[in-house]
Image (cartoon, grey):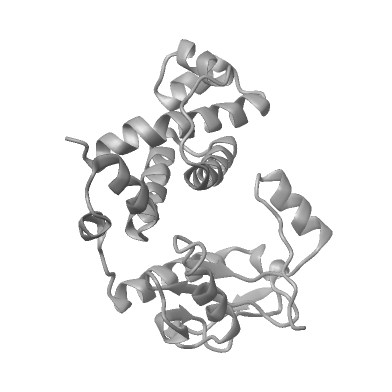
Amino acid sequence: MRTPSVYVAEELMPFLRAKIAERLYREGMKQSQIAEYLGITQAMVSKYLAGKYKMPPAEVAERLEDMANDVSSFILFGGSREDAILLVAKHIFDLFQTGFLCRFYSEYAGVSEDSCRSLFEVQPLRSEILEVLNMALNELLRDEKFPALIPEVRSNFAYSLPSPRGIEDVAAIPGRITAAKGKAFALPPEFGASGFTAGILVKLAAIRPEIRCVLNIRYGRDIESALTAAGFKVGRVKRGG
């Protein structure tokens, strides 16, 4: 039987591990260290670095490369092996939950997409969304360095339900996050509290449904350099006409 776990193990993990190994090796990590972190042999790491691994479909490969970049950055910045495993699991679950991987899994296993979606269909309660966003918000407010990242128009922090249909399905900060006397202040999150920031997530849901959270901060060369150094991709979006 070709269950989702078999699909992940056979079709996704070899490519994902290879991309993580490539990034870590480029950043100076030894093959023995990479092998220990990924839970594989050093011979397998050498094989991956030689480009000997199965290529998934282009769309899947693109998502896995993004995932590998996130996980590699997490590892390079000192994240534990256990937390890295949880991060990978969450990413893969999200790709199933949004339906993206169900299209490819259904072809692999010979089952319908609807059957796949039913396995991963989990609708969080609005209260759960508010609770998670509030926890993340409090972490930001406690960070003494965060006020320096707040732009003149102030920051907002938004988190949506899966597949949001409109801004009413997105929780955000009423009145935005503001800074005064070196401290950040914000009201508790509410659904429908944002127009622009929430609108970004609504639009993204049609393109990258696994992206359900967004935070706006100030722009600067220092910010762009820090993001690039951390392994993130920096893009630009044109607003208005």
Q: Residue at x 47, y 19 (%)?
A: 35
Q: Eyeballing the image, is 228 above or below 208?
A: above
Residue 156 image point, x, y percent? 59, 77
Q: Residue at x 28, y 48 (%)?
A: 106
Q: Residue at x 40, y 55 (%)?
A: 100
Residue 131 image point, x, y percent? 36, 72
Classify the position of the N terminus by image quarter. Answer: top left
Q: Eyeballing the image, is 4 above or below 179?
A: above
Looking at the rendering, which quadrant does residue 69 occupy?
top right
Count of marks overlaid on the render: 0
Query: Relative to the observer, which residue lies in front, 8 or 143?
Result: 8
Q: Eyeballing the image, is 208 above or below 55?
A: below
Residue 128 image point, x, y percent? 31, 72
Classify the position of the C terminus by image quarter. Answer: bottom right
Query: Relative to the observer, which residue lies in front, 26 or 187?
Result: 26
Residue 124 image point, x, y percent? 29, 70
Horizontally, residue 85 falls left or right of residue 238, namely left
Query: Relative to the observer, which residue lies in front, 5 or 60?
Result: 60
**Quick one: which residue is furthest to the left in this view?**
1
**Quick one: which residue is furthest to the top in this view?**
43
**Quick one: which residue is furthest to the right in this view?**
221
Q: Eyeballing the image, is 217 above or below 110?
A: below
Horizontally, residue 193 falls left or right of residue 101, namely right
Q: Residue at x 52, y 21 (%)?
A: 48
